[in-house]
Image (cartoon, rainbow, N blue to C red):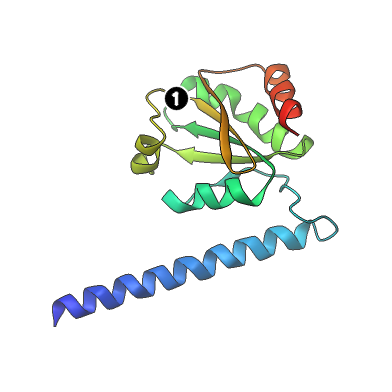
Amino acid sequence: MQLVNRMSDADELEEIRQEKIESLKTEESGEDAGESGAAPDEPIHISGVDHLQEVAESYGVVLVDFYADWCGPCKMIEPVVAALAEETDAAVAKVDVDSLQQLAAQYQVQGVPTLMLFSDGEMVERMTGARQRPQLEQLIQQYS
């Protein structure tokens, strides 16, 4: 009986998760109603293992910032990452490596910050360590 309840709870959680993902997609597309697939003006906080792939496939170019709250260089580039979300055509996603250790391991993140650039759902660039804004802008333009 207890096993049945756990399975039912897991199914319910998955259903809630899927509804939330759809809700977020609707909100994002509502903000940019005039453009199909337009990137949001703020970083997208990744909530789970599958969420990153969904985001990477939803936008043409996605800059992903694997970070940790305790990381000095991560805090240093946070305003740059936020500005890139607001001022470029790329979507920007943030992954907290402490909360999403499985995702960080899947992408072999061994140091933070690690920045990855996805184009058309595929990872095309990877950088570890803080980077200057002009370098990141040029990289985004290269794939836009």
Q: Bin the neighbour count of mark 1 within 10 Å (Cα to Cα): few under 14, some 14-19, many 20 and up.
A: many
- Up-down relation of residue 93 to residue 65 (above or below): below
Residue at coordinates 44% horizontally, 24% vertically from top-left? 112
Left of 72 or right of it: where is 137? right
Residue at coordinates 74% horizontally, 21% vertically from top-left? 138
Q: Residue 82: x and y, percent?
A: 67, 35
Q: Residue 57: x and y, percent?
A: 60, 49
- Up-down relation of residue 143 to residue 13 (above or below): above
The N terminus appears in which quarter of the rendering?
Answer: bottom left
Q: Quadrant of residue 56?
A: top right
Residue at coordinates 59% horizontally, 24% vertically from top-left? 77
Q: Quadrant of residue 101?
A: top left
- Up-down relation of residue 44 to residue 140 (above or below): below
Q: Residue 132: x and y, percent?
A: 65, 16
Q: Is residue 24 visible?
A: yes
State the SS at label 1.
loop
User: Which residue in the structure is indicated by mark 1?
Assistant: 112
Q: Residue 22: x and y, percent?
A: 58, 66
Residue at coordinates 44% horizontally, 73% vertically from top-left? 15
Which of 121 and 28 lies nearest the eye of the viewer? 121
Q: Is residue 48 visible?
A: no
Q: Quadrant of residue 64?
A: top right
**Residue at the extreme right:** 34
Left of 50 or right of it: where is 2? left
Counting the numbered discs, the total is 1
Q: Amino acid at mark 1?
A: Val
**Residue at the extreme bottom:** 1
The C terminus appears in which quarter of the rendering?
Answer: top right
